[in-house]
Image: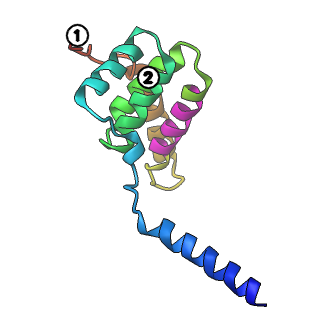
Amino acid sequence: MKFLFLVVVALALVFVACAEHGVTPNAQYYFKSKAQLQATEREGLAGDNAAARRMADYYYFTQNDRGDCMWWLKLAASRGDSVAKENLRKLQGEQLSRLDCGKSYFCSKRRREISSFISSNSSKRWSRMVLM
């Protein structure tokens, strides 16, 4: 019985010690420096799909910029990245679900218009300036 009590106390201390160290919710998506951000951007533009997905995560989770996030995901998806294709599909579905206007005919027509606009115009992004 005494042994069980000591085990419970030890586990409680471990969990309490772990709970003290706070983690910023999106800390893993930040870059350590501007140079690291620029290097990852160059790698993503040069053809590295993992770097392009990393840039998409950065814009989505830290900058709350869905436009840039979608651009990076489309870049990786156009190169055949299945993870980017799935994330892009989810992000586009999330945008369409925000159009909460019921099931009327005009609303469904508007959703189709916006969906086709997103798929046709999102590839017409302005060129990015990369500092080398």
Residue in the picture at 50% in, 65% down: 18
Of 99 and 63, the residue lying toward us: 63
Q: Quadrant of residue 57?
A: top left
The x and y percentages for residue 98 are 44, 50
Q: Residue at 70% across / 78% down in the picture? A: 7
Residue denoted by label 1: 132
Tell me the quarter of the image containing the C terminus: top left
Element class at badge 1: loop
The mark tally for this picture is 2
Q: Residue furthest front?
A: 2
| Span shown in magenta | 85-96
Q: Quadrant of residue 11?
A: bottom right
Which residue is most to the right?
1
Give residue 70's position: percent from left, percent from top: 41, 30
How much space separates mark 1 and mark 2, taking CA atoms?
Answer: 17 Å
Please state the horizontal and vertical placement of residue 99, each as a whole percent of the image.
Answer: 43, 49
Q: Earlier in the sequence, mark 1 or mark 2?
A: 2
The answer to whether residue 117 is visible is no
- Is 58 colored magenta in this rendering? no
Most common SS among magenta residues: helix
The residue drawn where x is 50% and y is 56% is 102
Asked which colour scheme the image uses, the reply is rainbow
Q: Nearer the viewer, residue 15 or 91?
A: 15
Q: Amino acid at mark 2?
A: Ala
Percent x, y of residue 101 = 45, 54
> Label 2, on which residue?
52
Tell me if mark 2 has few (under 14), some (14-19) or many (20+) residues whose alpha carbon lies within 10 angstroms of its own.
many
Note whether 110 is above or below 88 in the view shown: below
Which of discs 1 and 2 lies nearer the camera? The answer is 1
The amino acid type found where label 1 is placed reads: Met
Residue placed at 30% from the left, 35% from the top? 32
